[in-house]
Structures are given as structure tokens and as C-alpha cells.
Image: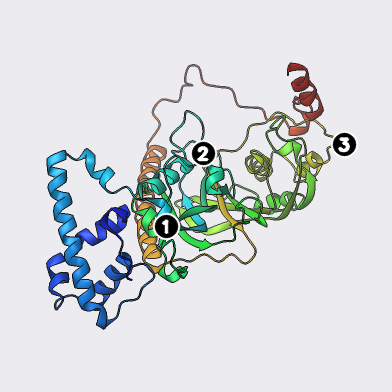
Amino acid sequence: MLSVRPLSDLNQIEYSEIWKLDLRHIVAMPQVTWGTCQKVYEVLVPGSKYSSDKAAQLASIMRKFSDELLQQSQETRRRGPDDKKSQRDIDFSKYQKRHIALDIAYQGFEYHGFARQDGINKTIEEELFSAMRKTRLIPSGMTWKELSYSRGGRTDKGVSAAGQVIALEVRSRALLGEGSISEEMEFDYPAILNKVLNPEIRVLGWKTVESSFSARFSARSREYKYFFIEENQELDVPAMQKAATYLVGEHDFRNFCKADIPTVSNFVRKILSASLHRTSSLKLGNFTGVELHIEGTAFLWHQIRCIAAVLHAVGKGLEPPEVVRDLLDTKTNDRKPQYSMASEQPLLLNQCSYKGLCFNRSEQVASSVNKEMSMEISRLLSRALLLVRMRERVMNAPITNHSKTMGSKKPHNYIPLLKRMREPSIEERLLRYQHSS
């Protein structure tokens, strides 16, 4: 017996797509294209393929569907808009589940980091879960453990990502009791989520994964990029590259992180590669970009931003490249010098790598995201070019008053890192924590 999904079981995106179609044409059938019939049939009858001999069957289904829409519209007008949502709630127990990984990009500038935090709503993770509940891919109220949820990385406030990965169990299009369906017949999860997500967050692809897959623990490596902006090519990139080579390998990075006591007591991490180059894709006026690429198996809290700060000092000629080697020598330098981290906004989680994981990416999603990003790049470049021209006018304007401004600051005298005040050692911090607790 044919199992037809009732109107109440459709998620928000399916409902809107069906609603857009001309139901009179579907019922009459002659003016409807094959593609439209196929699309509607696969939504309403999961796991079944449309063929010409099913035209009358589809017409019958759509007459019933049209009646349901009319009845729902009348009931909504009688009861008010607040009841419309409850009319479309679905029974998740009727559907199969699918454990999937999602490939996600986001601009984190205006968000309080990726991970959800108590009392803070504006996080990437909160937006993703809200979108999944809204599109009926996960039930409300389920815990992370119940959803088998995991994340590949935990980016901080203001940090962006081109390839963050999460994994969890979501609703499949297939009903319980039916055979499993192929990925080609499954929901286009990115397309569904992107229609309700904020424009700064986009899901790029998805893939079915084993129940044992963890976005965190199954990752073979994580790649970050950091972008330095220079004027008139002021940075000594070869010196920065020489300094970066000392990072490669397994080292104690306690002098290149913010110590998360007592959560972390082992500061040894393995860097697989670290390189710098001037990027040809960014040049505006006298401004160019220098890109740091660093790949490792795992990273400490603020490790990349601390590394970026030290490399920038090397590029400015304030430190020799060997300062990185000396800071990694924790027998000689067991306490971190006091220095400020580099800004969070130029930091990008480029990708998380997994053995054999290749995401499904639809042409529809790729085209849509590409168009959105192109428009955003044009908007930001227009603003940057405007500022470049404004600055040129300020710099070229004649100076008529050469007297010193009252209260002007004295030039800053740079103190080399190895001669600065030191923070308490890790052992001292652990001892303090143990006494306080």
C-alpha cells in the first residue's frame, strides 16, 4: 500500500515549496512539467520514483492535498495565526534517523564564538540548532547526547570559519518501516537550513557518517589561516617564515597560549606545517595581505593568536626569528612573557580534515552561496576603497599648523619579549588552584 505523507508531516521548506506550485495545474496534469511532477511526488511519497503511469495517482494525491490546504487555511483564519505552527508539528517517531556530518562556513565577527554558552544567545551553534528545530530536522528539547552531537573545533568570539564540521542525528525523509533511501533521494540538508539561517552562516555540504563518528575525535588535523595586513610591504615575510619553521613538530606551547587551568595540564601539541606568503588575491592601494597557514592535530586556547602576535613582531623587525625557538624551550623559559594576543577578526578556521570524508555539495547550494559571498565581498571592498580615498585626501592636504598637539603620547619603547615581566608558571597556577579549591 502506498504510504503518502500527510500535510502535517511536511517540514517548513517542503511546505513552502509545495505551496508555491499552481495546484490547479497539478490536478489538471496536462500543463505540468515532468520535473515538477517528479519533485512533488518524491516529497509526498518518500522512497518512490515518479513515472508516467503514476500521473493519475499523483493527481489524486494532490486533490487531497489541495483540500487539506484549503481546510487548514479556513481553520487558521478562524483560530488565528498562532495555531498554524502547531498544525504543522510532526511526529518524529514515524521517521528514520540519519547520522550526518555538516560542513559549515560562517563570519563570526558579530557572534560570541561558535559554542553555545549559558546566558548568551548570539552564538553560531545556537543559530544552527534554532534552524534545525525550525525546519523540523530535530525535535525540540533533545539533549546533545541524545542527538549524538559533536563539533570539530571551538572558535572564540569574533573568529570565522570556512570549514567547521559538526555531526549529529537528524530526521530522514524515509518513514519507519520502509527501506532506507540513498543520499541522492534524501533531503538537501544545506539547502533547507540555509533558507532559515542568518546570511553570515551557511551550510556548504553534508555526508552520512557512521554512528561512531565524532567531529572532534575523528579529525586527523585542523587548519587555520591568519591574515596580516601591511602597508607598503612593511613586513619582513622571509624572517616570519624562518620563525614559523621552529613551530613545526611536537613542542610544549605553554608560552604561545592562554593557560586554561585546570582544564588543560598538558601543553604539548603537534604542528604539521606552518608557512607564510604574500597573497596575490588582496591588494588595495598600498595595502597588501600576508597569509599565515598553520596545520596541527589539535590546538590550545588562543594558540594561533599568540603565535600570530609573535610572528608579527618578527615581521616588524622587533624580534629575531629565533625568539620562537627560545619560547619553545620551556626548560629555559618556563614562564610566559607578558604580551598581547593578535586580534581575533583576521583568524579563520579553514578546515577540519577526516579520513575518507567527502561532503555532498549540490549545485543549487554552491551557486547560491557563491552569489551571496560575491555580493558581500563587493560591498566590503567598496567601503574599503572609499576609506583608502578618504585617507589619501587627508594625507595630501597641506598642514598649516605645525605646533605639537597638547597631550600627545610619547613614542612607545618596545621591550623584547625575553626581557619582559613573566606570568606565573603553569605549576604555580595549578598549585594556586588546588589551594583555592
Q: Assess whether mark 3 and mark 1 are in contact (beta carbons under 8 angstroms).
A: no
Question: Which of disc 3 and disc 1 is earlier in sequence?
Answer: 1
Q: Mark 2, residues whose alpha carbon is within 10 Å: few (<14), some, or many (≥20)?
A: many
As rendered, which of 25 and 128 lies closer to the eye? 25
Determine whether the residue tagged by mark 1 lies in a helix, strand or loop. strand
State the mark number for residue 95.
1
Q: CA distance from mark 2 to mark 3?
A: 34 Å
Helix, strand or loop at label 3? It is loop
Q: Cα distance, mark 1 to mark 3?
A: 58 Å
Can you give x and y, in whole percent of width and height, for residue 89 in the image?
32, 47
Answer left or right for 8 relative to 393: left
Q: In the displayed orientation, state which residue is furthest to the right.
A: 331
Q: Residue at x 16, y 75 (%)?
A: 29
| Foreground: disc 2 or disc 3 | 2
Residue 359 visible? The answer is yes
Establish if 254 lies above or below 74. above
Q: Residue furthest front?
A: 1
Residue pointed to by mark 2: 113
Q: Percent x, y for residue 425?
A: 79, 27
- List the residue tagged with mark 3: 331
Task: Report the side of 28 relative to 324 (left or right).
Answer: left
Looking at the picture, how far across and down is residue 227, in whole percent?
Answer: 56, 49
Q: Quarter of the image holding residue 85?
A: top left
Residue at screen point 50% across, 17% down: 407
